[in-house]
Each structure stands twice: as C-alpha cells, then as structure tokens.
Image: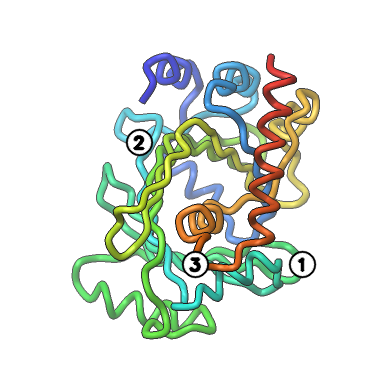
Amino acid sequence: MDKQLEALLNSFDSNGLEDVKQLSFAKRREEKYILHFDTLFYVLPLLKEYYSILEISNQRYQTYETQYWDTPHYDMFHQYQRKIGNRYKIRTRQYLESGIEYIELKHKNNKDFSLKKRQRLSSDHRLETIKNFIKEHSPYQYDELEKTVKNRYFRISLLNKINNERITIDINFHSSLAPEYTSTLDLSHLAIIESKKLIEDHSFLEEIFLKERYFSIGFSKYAMAVALLKGDKLKTNQLKRKQHLLKKHLERLDQNAY
C-alpha cells in the first residue's frame, strides 16, 4: 500500500464491520468510475466530510481475491457483452486478511437493478455448499461451469454518513487466467470506484464527480479481464469498443487533470 495514500485514509472517520452489516442491502443501483490511481490524492479529501471509512483489525483497506466461474463457452461473459437482461455472475470471494470466504451470485435484472446473494463457506462441505448454492440461485449447475479468471486487489470501503450508500475503491488490481494462472493482467495504474445505493439515496460522490467532470462508465472487472486475457480466443468486438472508450476516457482525464 502506498504510504501517502495510507496516511490519507487514516485521516477519515472510521466505522467497524458491524456498521457495514447494518447498511447491507441486496437490491441496489450501481455507478462505476475509472480514474488514474494518482487522482485519488485529489478526490479523497473532497469525500472526507461526507463519508467514513471501514476499518477492520486496525486496517483501512482489505485484500480481496475473487475466483469467477463461467461455462466452457463463456456464456455469462457473452451475455454481459450483449447487455442481456437477467444475466448472472458467479464467484467465490476470499478476504485474505481474515481467510473468510463466500460463494456469491450477482443477478442483473431487466430493470437494471443488481441483486446479490452470498453464503459463507467453510472447509467442511465446501464443495457441496457451492453446488447447492449455484443450483438454488441460478439457472446453472455446478458441473456446467469451470474456473475462468481470478482477480486480486485492495479494496477501500467508504460509508455515506447520512444514508445507505456505500463506495468501494479498488486499487492494485491484478488478474490471472485459469487453469495455470500464468497469463496475467496488471491494472494497478487505475482506481475502480463504485457507488452502491438504493435509488432514492443521495450520493455526495456522484455530485462531486459531476462537478469535477468525472463521468460514470460501464465497466465489469470480470468482463474486462476476460477480454484482455482471452480476447484472441473469444468474440470481444463490443468490449474492444469499450476498451477504446476507456482509453479515450483516460485521455480526457489527463487533459482535465487537477
């Protein structure tokens, strides 16, 4: 972790994990932003008045490792590309500092809401739990799926001081491709920022970012990792366009740098 960034995070008011649980909601609307990592040193001080930071075991960021699953033909990836409603993402997620792991499912419905379900995993009956969870909450069966990409990154979590909104800031992002995990992707020069809230909740981040001309951009860490690591073997025309738009987006940020 960058020492200057760590000092900046330490200047925020903090909340514990029990506060995040109180704010937990499965049905939410999301907005994503992609910024250069260095822009955080300008942005975070603007947010400090309105958001507190999640602190766990005296640490204000957590290391996530996420293993995604898809069909052999990458059906879930292609559904994302085509923006099909009622699409799914299936993953296991581990919090490396604590070793806690979940099986998670994210369902984007036809109304553009994200619905998320998850279940904690333990070493006892882990595989059985994963199989039953996938069967119960998705149109897939475990045996239809295989491991695809694995993402690892640091996550900073901010909580709106007056409503249910949560902000996540993912940095030091790296991805690798199953089964060997030798093909790797490094996006550590970027910060991936996401606002997660109920539709009626006000977002100070969205208000500030609009003023600063930081605009939201459709972005899936899973889909982008697949496109960049496996694009030569899959049809990724729509994501190639999105990669081009992302490049233009970052160039515009450079031109309007603070």
**Classed neighbour count for the residue bearing mark 1: other residues with Cα under 10 Å, few (<14), some (14–19), many (≥20):** few
Residue 102 locus on image (x, y percent): 36, 61
- On the image, numbered disc 2 is attached to which residue? 56
- Real-space CA distance between mark 3 and mark 1, rounded to the nearest whole angstrom: 32 Å
Front one among 95 and 51: 95
Q: Quadrant of residue 41?
A: top right
Is 46 on the left or on the right of 90, as rendered?
Answer: right
- On the image, numbered disc 3 is attached to which residue? 233
Type of amino acid at the residue the image marks with label 2? Ile
- Real-space CA distance between mark 2 and mark 1, rounded to the nearest whole angstrom: 34 Å
The residue depicted at 69 percent of the width and 17 percent of the height is: 257
Q: Nearer the viewer, mark 3 or mark 1?
A: 3
User: Of label 2 and label 1, which has the lower sequence position?
Assistant: 2
Residue 198 vertical placement versus 138 (above, below): above
Evaluate if marks 2 and 1 touch, with contact meaning CB atoms under 8 Å apart: no
Front one among 99 and 39: 39
Type of amino acid at the residue the image marks with label 1? Lys
- On the image, numbered disc 1 is attached to which residue? 111
Image quarter of the C terminus: top right
Residue 185 vertical placement versus 235 (above, below): above
Residue 71 locus on image (x, y percent): 46, 77
Is 70 on the left or on the right of 200, as rendered?
Answer: left
Label 1: state its secondary structure: loop
Q: Quadrant of residue 192?
A: top right
Label 3: state its secondary structure: loop
**Classed neighbour count for the residue bearing mark 3: other residues with Cα under 10 Å, few (<14), some (14–19), many (≥20):** few
Type of amino acid at the residue the image marks with label 3? Lys
